[in-house]
Image (spheres, rainbow, N blue to C red):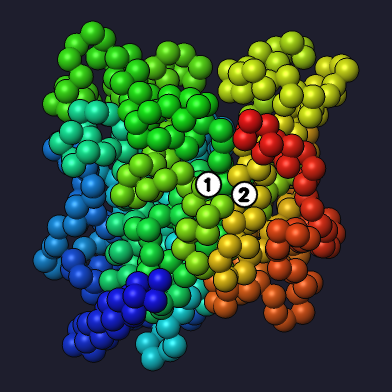
């Protein structure tokens, strides 16, 4: 670890000195009145949103080469350089995906393209100021949907509070996470994790260039929600992220019993990543030979539209593939062994994570609930079902919400937090309980905290309580990014998490502390999984 830190410091001082030289010789800065900066691939023209504060946004910056043609299912390559000044006032294309998320949010689906490895920067830094903490946002969407510039993720409020905010795109679905023997053979024996490797490439871009926007390359916080939280979980556990990240915030990380898979060989609960890839390729290629060339002959629209739906043969649930350079062994096991990157962690979940997903898997009765459990837990399904008892339709809905909340989000979050006992850095847990006033039937649902974190609440029913909670939450997030501890000022004290007491901060109608969130049921879930 000390050797990594020393090497990191040498690299960072080189980056800082080169960035400073570019800054002086070009007389360009993130707070320039013209909104022009010079990075390692060329000059950028951003949009000045507020001349008085210097708030400027740079959109659609390529951080890696377009992963098209022979670069599909390859490690991301460096972005091309350009001459002149590149317009950075429009967002880039987003990665290929179905319109499901856009339909759910009521937003129009932006232009999609395999050429989608773009990031965006919000900054209000001025020339001569101390470098500002950097926060890198990783969007959610099941590793199959979403984009870094969704309206909720506007970085203006963070920039106004002294942060340089970066949001990124990364490859999604089979295009981002396919593991397959044909791809492994041509790439030194492994495949998969391409979307995560895109995130590593974006972090390396930040390392090289963020000083030009007033950011501090020695203070980089990654944060993300749902699949973005999965990404934070994976990056924090990956040796490839060592030296690139200084703090981590995981909001409702999606960590299930089936989305962490070995590259080869079943792990006792499900097929290998390559096995899933073979089944997917058969669904799209039929009985044809499954070669890398045949896979790359598929156009992206075919991949998106013809991939079978969840639960059908050949469906594709993206996953963390371990037994690879990115993830040598199971990410959850790395936390248990203290092998994750030793940096401060803030992680939490919402009270009703499951309500958003129940319409996609409606249950007619308890017998059907048990059948869904057998698909994952096999002979242990009855034991799991006993943890969520119900005697009628209404109770079944409550228990289905609890089951999804626990097994998709809380269990994995708690595993990350417990793993922090094995390293020196602190951890902090939150529990978001504010019922969404725009959709109270869903309660404090999955992703409900995002408008509070970004201060982008939209709707007629939010009131002063919501505004105060949003101001408090973004202040916690910013202070954590600045110092590695969310405490400070006149905010309610947030206790440090440890495996014995398991203290957390509730963020809701009241802001208060608690201990041992759903400890008993999650202990029992872990015991069942270990059988």
Q: Residue at x 26, y 10 (%)?
A: 286
Q: Is residue 411 visible?
A: yes
Residue 38 horizontal side relative to residue 176, left or right: left
Q: Position of residue 498 (x, y in %)?
A: 70, 63
Q: Residue at x 66, y 50 (%)?
A: 414
Quick one: which residue is furthest to the right in this view? 391
User: Which of 376 and 250 lies nearest the eye of the viewer?
Assistant: 376
Which of the 4 image quadrants contains residue 106? top right
Quick one: which residue is furthest to the left in this view? 83
Can you say whether 168 is above or below 422 in the image? above
Can you say whether 440 is above or below 42 in the image? above
Which of the 4 image quadrants contains residue 475? bottom right
Tag 2 residue: 415
- Number of other residues with Cα within 10 Å of mark 2, as a class: few under 14, some 14 to 19, many 20 or more: some
**Disc 1 on helix, strand or loop?**
helix
Q: Position of residue 217 (x, y in %)?
A: 38, 75
Residue 246 horizontal side relative to residue 27, left or right: right
Q: Position of residue 499 (x, y in %)?
A: 71, 58
Quick one: which residue is furthest to the bottom in this view? 128
Residue 163 horizontal side relative to residue 295, left or right: right
Quick one: which residue is furthest to the top in this view? 287
Tag 1 residue: 332
Q: Position of residue 135 (x, y in %)?
A: 48, 66
User: Which of 398 and 181 lies nearest the eye of the viewer?
Assistant: 181
Residue at mark 1 to residue at mark 2: CA–CA distance: 7 Å
Q: Residue at x 35, y 34 (%)?
A: 263
Determine which of the numbered discs, if any, sits on residue 235 in the image.
none
Q: Earlier in the sequence, mark 1 or mark 2?
A: 1
Q: Are marks 1 and 2 in contact (CB under 8 Å)?
A: yes
- Number of other residues with Cα within 10 Å of mark 1, as a class: few under 14, some 14 to 19, many 20 or more: some
């Amino acid at each position: 670890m000390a050797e990594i830190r020393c090497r990191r410091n040498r690299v960072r001082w080189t980056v800082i000195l080169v960035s400073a030289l570019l800054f002086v010789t070009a007389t360009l800065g993130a707070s320039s009145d013209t909104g022009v900066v010079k990075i390692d691939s060329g000059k950028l023209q951003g949009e000045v949103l507020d001349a008085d504060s210097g708030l400027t946004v740079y959109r659609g910056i390529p951080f890696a080469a377009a992963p098209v043609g022979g670069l599909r299912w390859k490690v991301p390559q460096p972005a091309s350089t350009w001459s002149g000044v590149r317009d950075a006032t429009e967002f880039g294309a987003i990665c290929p995906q179905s319109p499901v998320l856009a339909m759910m949010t009521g937003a129009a689906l932006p232009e999609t393209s395999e050429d989608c490895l773009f990031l965006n920067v919000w900054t209000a830094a001025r020339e001569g100021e101390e470098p500002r903490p950097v926060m890198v946002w990783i969007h959610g969407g099941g590793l199959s949907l979403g984009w870094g510039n969704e309206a909720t993720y506007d970085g203006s409020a963070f920039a106004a509070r002294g942060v340089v905010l970066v949001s990124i795109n990364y490859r999604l679905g089979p295009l981002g996470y396919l593991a397959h023997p044909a791809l492994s053979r041509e790439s030194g024996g492994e495949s998969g994790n391409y979307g995560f490797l895109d995130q590593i490439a974006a972090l390396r871009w930040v390392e090289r260039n963020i000083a030009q926007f007033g950011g501090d390359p020695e203070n980089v916080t990654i944060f993300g929600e749902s699949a973005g939280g999965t990404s934070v979980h994976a990056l924090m556990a990956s040796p490839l992220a060592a030296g690139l990240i200084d703090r981590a915030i995981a909001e409702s990380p999606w960590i299930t019993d089936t989305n962490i898979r070995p590259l080869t060989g079943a792990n006792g609960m499900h097929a290998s990543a390559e096995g899933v890839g073979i089944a997917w390729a058969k669904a799209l290629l039929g009985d044809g030979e499954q070669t890398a060339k045949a896979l790359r002959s598929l156009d992206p629209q075919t991949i998106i539209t013809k991939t079978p739906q969840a639960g059908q043969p050949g469906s594709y649930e993206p996953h963390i593939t371990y037994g690879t350079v990115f993830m040598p062994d199971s990410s959850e096991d790395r936390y248990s062994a203290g092998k994750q990157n030793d940096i401060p962690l803030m992680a939490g979940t919402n009270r009703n994570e499951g309500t958003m997903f129940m319409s996609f898997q409606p249950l007619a009765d308890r017998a059907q609930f048990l059948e869904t459990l057998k698909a994952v837990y096999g002979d242990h399904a009855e034991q799991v079902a006993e943890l969520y008892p119900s005697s009628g339709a209404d109770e079944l809905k409550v228990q289905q919400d609890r089951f999804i909340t626990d097994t998709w989000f809380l269990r994995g979050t708690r595993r990350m937090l417990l793993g922090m006992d094995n390293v020196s850095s602190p951890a902090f847990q939150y529990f978001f309980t504010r019922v969404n006033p725009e959709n109270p039937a869903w309660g404090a649902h999955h992703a409900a905290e995002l408008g509070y974190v970004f201060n982008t609440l939209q709707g007629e029913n939010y009131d002063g309580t919501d505004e105060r909670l949003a101001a408090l939450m973004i202040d916690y997030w910013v202070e954590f990014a600045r110092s590695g501890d969310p405490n400070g000022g006149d905010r309610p004290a947030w206790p440090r998490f440890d495996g014995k007491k398991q203290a957390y901060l509730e963020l809701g109608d009241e802001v208060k502390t608690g201990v041992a969130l759903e400890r008993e049921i999650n202990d029992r879930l872990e015991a069942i999984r270990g059988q």
